[in-house]
Image (cartoon, rainbow, N blue to C red):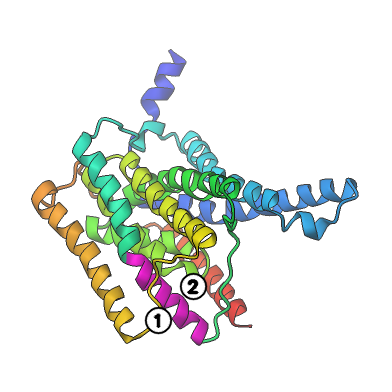
Amino acid sequence: MEKERQLFDKRNFYTDDDSGKVFIISLLAPLLVSLLVFLVCGAVVSASGLNVETELNSVWFTALSSVISSLTFVAVYLIYNKVAKIDNKTVSFNFKIGYKNYLIAILVGIVALLGLQQLISLFDILWENIGYNLTSTSINPTNFGLFALMVFVSAITPAICEEIIFRGMILNGLRTKFSDLSSIALSAFMFALIHGNLQQFIYPFLLGLVFGWLYLRTGSVISTMIAHFLNNFLVILFTYLVNVTGFSMIIPFSWWSVIVAIALAIVVFAIIYIIDKFLYKHKSVSEVKRQEGKISLFLWVSIALAVLIFLINLISAFI
């Protein structure tokens, strides 16, 4: 009887207050967990008589810390729902979205990568030219073993874990105070901010727009997980092919490569617009009841903190 009463007390919706709290926890928890992993692994390596600096810059540690950081999002999802008495099913993991939605998710994941990579490469050139130090903490797939490892570390786990937080929880919560379009844009901005640096801001923001739209039209994070996975997988695959064959799909910088990059980006969003107009008819699967009142202070505080961290990282990248 008590169990049934507890289940009844659980709510099946997120609010903007939940979005703010989840974002600030998702912002800080991976940093704290990564620090803990660093300290524990450092102590273990030191006790083993190995070189700490060498081991903590190795592939195994990079993979371990990346996976644990991603899994922290799942912990946030489970623990937050438990504490806030929210049904875990509020994040829709509906697999029964129809074959058309599966095909669209696959198409979106591929098209977004192929259409936006050239533009992102131009931004990287721009950042370098203004003195920004480009860095990479990911594993470089120079052989098939590292390629397979990176697929798990940088494609599978982020696609699952990040979508649960940003499309499943944060986007849904924002919709209770903002329009769908504003919610998509704000959640995409938050998704970009959590990456913490200028180099990884533009692309996640654009992907956040695409994934947010896809989630609202399909009503399931399964579709965005698929699109997210394919996007990351193709990035890893093309990097692997460059290492193995030397062939790159990125056009060398020139005046016409800028035109091509802009044109490809326009094509991406034109395709999405066509799909939205003719297949989805501009309609979302689920409607959310708008709530009156002020926007949660936690939301603004969480965004302000993320911006502060972003600016600190930005300044340090120029030093």
Q: Is residue 34 above or below residue 255?
A: above
Tell me which amino acid carries mark 1.
Phe
Q: Secondary structure at mark 1?
A: loop
Give neighbour class at mark 1: few <14, some 14-19, many 20+ (Cα, 10 Å).
few
The foreground one among 317 and 262 is 262
The foreground one among 16 and 315 is 315
Q: Name the image quarter holding residue 138.
A: bottom right
Tell me which amino acid carries mark 2.
Leu
Mark 1 = which residue? 253
The foreground one among 125 and 143 is 143
- The secondary structure that dominates the magenta segment is helix
- Residue 266: x percent and y percent? 22, 69
In percent of the image, x 18 and y 46: which residue is there?
284
In percent of the image, x 32 and y 86: which residue is there?
255
The numbered disc on residue 198 is 2
Task: Tell me the quadrant of the picture where the N terminus can be found.
Answer: top left
Q: Name the image quarter holding residue 120.
A: bottom left
Q: In the visual, does 191 lie left or right of 293?
A: right
Q: Is residue 275 above or below residue 204?
A: above
Which segment is the magenta one?
116-129
Q: Is residue 166 above or below residue 188?
A: above
Label 1, label 2: how far apart the Cα atoms are = 20 Å
Q: Is residue 284 above or below residue 190?
A: above
Q: In the visual, does 255 lie left or right of 39?
A: left
- Residue 61: x percent and y percent? 69, 50
Mark positioned earlier in the residue sequence (1 or 2): 2
